[in-house]
Image (cartoon, rainbow, N blue to C red):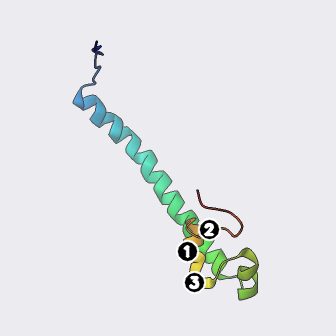
């Protein structure tokens, strides 16, 4: 026994206009995230080697750490 579910579709123009309405918000979030990352990287570059070691990163890992790509010690990656 198979059931047929009715498929509700929107006109293509409605999908396109919704995408265009979301575009400015997405662009704003991307730009603010970029400048937030740049500010965090700039502030971490001002730290000396001892302070970076206390945080658990090396100078070469600053950008990766800001983007969340450096695992924290004592925690497993999921």
Dot 3 and dot 2 residues touching (CB under 8 Å) = no
Q: Would you name the residue on which mark 3 appears?
A: 60
In the rendered structure, the answer to whether residue 29 lies left or right of residue 15 reads right
Which quadrant of the figure has residue 78? bottom right
Q: Is 20 or 77 nearer to us in this picture?
A: 77
Q: Categorize mark 1 by other alpha carbons within 10 Å: few (<14), some (14-19), many (20+).
A: some
Residue at 29 percent across and 33 percent down: it is 15
Residue at 67 percent across and 68 percent down: it is 72
Which quadrant of the figure has residue 64? bottom right
Q: Would you name the residue on which mark 2 appears?
A: 71
- Identify whether 35 is placed above or below 15: below
The x and y percentages for residue 10 are 28, 24
Q: Categorize mark 3 by other alpha carbons within 10 Å: few (<14), some (14-19), many (20+).
A: few
Which quadrant of the figure has residue 11? top left
Q: Nearer the viewer, mark 2 or mark 1?
A: 2
Q: Considering the numbered disc 3 on the image, is that residue within a helix, a strand or a loop?
A: helix
Structural distance between the alpha carbons of marks 2 and 1: 13 Å
Structural distance between the alpha carbons of marks 1 and 3: 8 Å
Q: Would you name the residue on which mark 1 appears?
A: 63
Structural distance between the alpha carbons of marks 3 and 2: 14 Å
Q: Considering the numbered disc 1 on the image, is that residue within a helix, a strand or a loop?
A: helix
Q: Is 7 or 78 nearer to us in this picture?
A: 78
The x and y percentages for residue 19 are 34, 39
Q: Is 20 or 45 nearer to us in this picture?
A: 45
């Amino acid at each position: 026994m198979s059931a047929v579910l009715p498929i509700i579709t929107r006109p293509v123009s409605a999908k396109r206009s919704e995408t265009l309405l979301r575009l400015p918000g997405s662009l704003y979030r991307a730009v603010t995230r970029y400048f937030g990352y740049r500010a965090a990287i700039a502030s971490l570059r001002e730290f000396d080697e001892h302070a970076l070691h206390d945080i658990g990163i090396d100078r070469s890992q600053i950008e990766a750490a800001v983007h969340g790509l450096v695992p924290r010690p004592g925690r497993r990656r999921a």
